[in-house]
């Protein structure tokens, strides 16, 4: 897989050790983390010792604004553990300053196309909390369609968890007819 992917406004590149500060800032914005951990802070040691090494080792991309080089957040495209390689999961997390500007949709579409064109994907999927309307809207704009609602057993459930998680998907045949 290439080390980077370009869209009209974004450069998606592999994470490096030098991204620790960017990741720390992103993962410590309570609004960004609202539907992920309830907005609780993430210790720097966890970012440096666990999160960043995991991002470097797998299908995570740092998202940069092409003109300025500013770090906007990240995307991932990878099959979860125990899932078939031809069914990668799409994910994204962006700074609030990048919200509502089409970056999540732009980066997601590029990765979906890469999954089907280059990686031989049979299906691309994404999921979020049912109450996360913004993320669901991105999934819909990318051509993913609602597939199911499911419930996870949370030790310390976030507000809205009782409404469950939603999964969206796009199958190869649907992508080919777009």
Image (cartoon, rainbow, N blue to C red):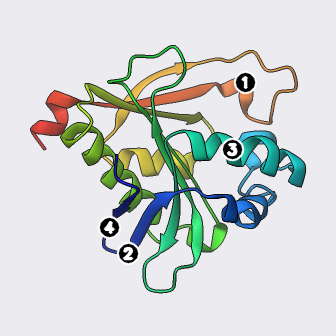
Q: Can you identify the residue that label 1 sits on? A: 162
Circle 2 or circle 3, nearest the eye: 3
Give the Cα distance between marks 4 and 2.
6 Å
Across and down, in percent, residue 133 comes to 56, 47
Across and down, in percent, residue 93 comes to 60, 53
Give the Cα distance between marks 2 and 1.
37 Å
Circle 3 or circle 4, nearest the eye: 3
Front in this rendered view, residue 21 or 106: 21
Q: Can you identify the residue that label 3 sits on? A: 53
Where 89 sits versus 63, above or below?
above
Circle 3 or circle 1, nearest the eye: 3
Disc on the earlier residue, 3 or 4: 4
Residue at 72% from the left image edge and 24% from the top image edge: 162
Where 40 sits versus 101, above or below?
above
Across and down, in percent, residue 30 comes to 81, 57
Give the Cα distance between marks 3 and 1.
32 Å
Q: Can you identify the residue that label 2 sits on? A: 9
Q: Quadrant of residue 173?
A: top left
Query: Badge 4: how crowded within 10 Å, few (<14), some, or many (20+)?
Result: some
Query: Answer yes or no: do the residues labelled 4 and 2 have beta carbons within 8 Å?
Result: yes
Q: Can you identify the residue that label 4 sits on? A: 7
Residue at 67% from the left image edge and 63% from the top image edge: 19
Disc on the earlier residue, 1 or 4: 4
Give the Cα distance between marks 2 and 3.
27 Å
């Amino acid at each position: 897989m290439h080390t980077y992917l370009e869209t009209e406004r974004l450069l998606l590149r592999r994470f490096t050790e030098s991204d620790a500060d960017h990741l720390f800032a992103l993962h410590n914005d309570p609004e960004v983390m609202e539907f992920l951990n309830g907005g609780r802070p993430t210790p720097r040691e966890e970012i440096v010792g666990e999160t960043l090494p995991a991002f470097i080792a797998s299908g995570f991309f740092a998202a940069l604004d092409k003109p300025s080089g500013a770090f906007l957040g990240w995307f991932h495209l990878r099959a979860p553990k125990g899932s078939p390689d031809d069914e990668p999961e799409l994910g994204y997390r962006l700074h609030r300053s990048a919200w509502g500007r089409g970056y999540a949709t732009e980066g997601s579409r590029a990765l979906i196309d890469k999954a089907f064109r280059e990686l031989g994907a049979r299906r691309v999927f994404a999921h979020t909390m049912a109450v996360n309307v913004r993320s669901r809207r991105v999934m819909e704009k990318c051509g993913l369609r609602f597939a199911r609602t499911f419930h996870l057993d949370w030790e310390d459930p976030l507000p809205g968890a009782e409404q469950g998680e939603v999964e969206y998907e796009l199958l190869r045949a649907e992508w080919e007819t777009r």
